[in-house]
Amino acid sequence: MLIYNFLLYLLYPIILIRLAIYTFKNSLSLSYISHKLLNSTSIKKKSLWIHAASVGEMKIAIGLSQELLKNGYKDILITSNTPSSKYYFDNSQIKGVEHCYLPLDYYLLTKNLVNKISAKLLIVIETEVWPNLYNSCKKNGTKILIINGRFNAPKGILGILSKNLYKNTLDNVEHVYTKSIKDKESYEKFLNETKVSNIGNIKYSFLSNKSNQKLIDRKYVLLASSHHREEIIIIKEWLKLKSNKYLLVIVPRHPERLGDILSDIPLSGINIAIRSKDEKVRNSTQLYIADTIGELESFIEYCEFTIFGGSFVDVGGHSFMEAAAKAKTIIVGPYMYNFIEETEEFLKNNALIMCQKPIMLKNIFEKLFRSKSKREVFEKCAKKLVQEKRFIINDYLKLIDTHFKG
């Protein structure tokens, strides 16, 4: 911990500069910096605290909060790290739940926040492991649960150097409930196996059935949650298609990457429209970059089929559950190690297409365009799988009750 905190304070000027650039680049208010660096929240004491890193975890946090409110829980706080997650929280209009940003993991900031909230239980969703936060909770008597646990420890030299830090930090956790057997095994390298249990992926319980507004009139294929260099990989294969009447819609994982995306694309001869600039989609438009927040569900609902990002570059993939719930044909690349069990199950049940090499994409696109019946097979199988698992929330609610009341 001493080395960790020494490095944090040593890096403070760099962190401050990066945070200022991020705030300015994304037109955020100065309150974002004050929350992250000064813990300037007015939040009072809460009995239950849920932490969600970003949008994906926030969706779980809101769904879980709604269920907990039905079960009589009160005074719920959700913390998160990103402006996009706050945007999603605000749009949810959930009653009886407050939100604030989690400050950076400096000892005094986390200690003050933990003391201010004085929650009985902190529920951390998926992957967040913060040494000072966890240590402060332990000292304050706030129990910590990790739910839907997903864990990939650092590898190489960083993994060796941080192993004891991870062990000591996770030792403050009362129990970890993982989303898969593989994740359970990952946690057991750092925790006693009696403190780790596999329950399953809670995301199956919070997949939206509501109908969204159609945002564009053209028929399109969706590239969802793409990362650096991934857009150009997909675009190159897309442009190989002859007489292509479909539009390719790109929803980047991080909308602020628009400049990087445009610099990667050979702009000459390609007709591009950008959503954040209110540019219209015309019949001649080939690529539509939807660099906005909170619209992915709508784009998923009306696409012909979807390609999930984070899987054609070494990121580990992203959850494709929302697309499955909307009965869409889903294509992923070879890098799906964050969702191994889900990917294997969907492949086994003919509910997913895995493309091992980008060069194979053109052939996959052509087959799907030619055969609507082929797409329908994948769509039906995907929807059936998610419907079978939608009641997993009940297992998590029972466990939360046990730890909260225990």
Image (spheres, rainbow, N blue to C red):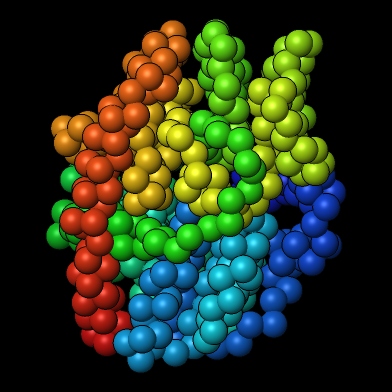
Mark yes or no: residue 245 visible.
yes
Q: Residue at x 43, y 40 (%)?
A: 318
Q: Nearer the viewer, residue 19 or 96?
A: 96
Please state if 69 lies on the left or on the right of 24 as rendered.
Answer: left
Residue 312 appears at what percent x and percent y? 45, 23
Residue 225 appears at what percent x and percent y? 53, 38
Please state if 274 lies on the left or on the right of 131 as rendered.
Answer: right
Q: Residue at x 51, y 51 (%)?
A: 297
Residue 316 appears at what percent x and percent y? 41, 32
Q: Residue at x 63, y 41 (%)?
A: 217
Which quarter of the picture shows residue 173? bottom left
Q: Nearer the viewer, residue 2 or 403?
A: 403
Mark yes or no: residue 138 visible.
no
The image shows a total of numbered marks equal to 0
Q: Is residue 80 above or below residue 155?
A: below
Residue 3 appears at what percent x and percent y? 54, 46
Which quarter of the picture shows residue 285? top right
Which quarter of the picture shows residue 270? top right
Please state if 184 lies on the left or on the right of 231 as rendered.
Answer: left
Q: Residue at x 34, y 45 (%)?
A: 327
Q: Nearer the viewer, residue 62 or 325?
A: 325
Q: Is residue 135 above or below residue 152?
A: below
Quarter of the image with the C terminus is bottom left
Q: Is residue 404 above or below residue 40?
A: below
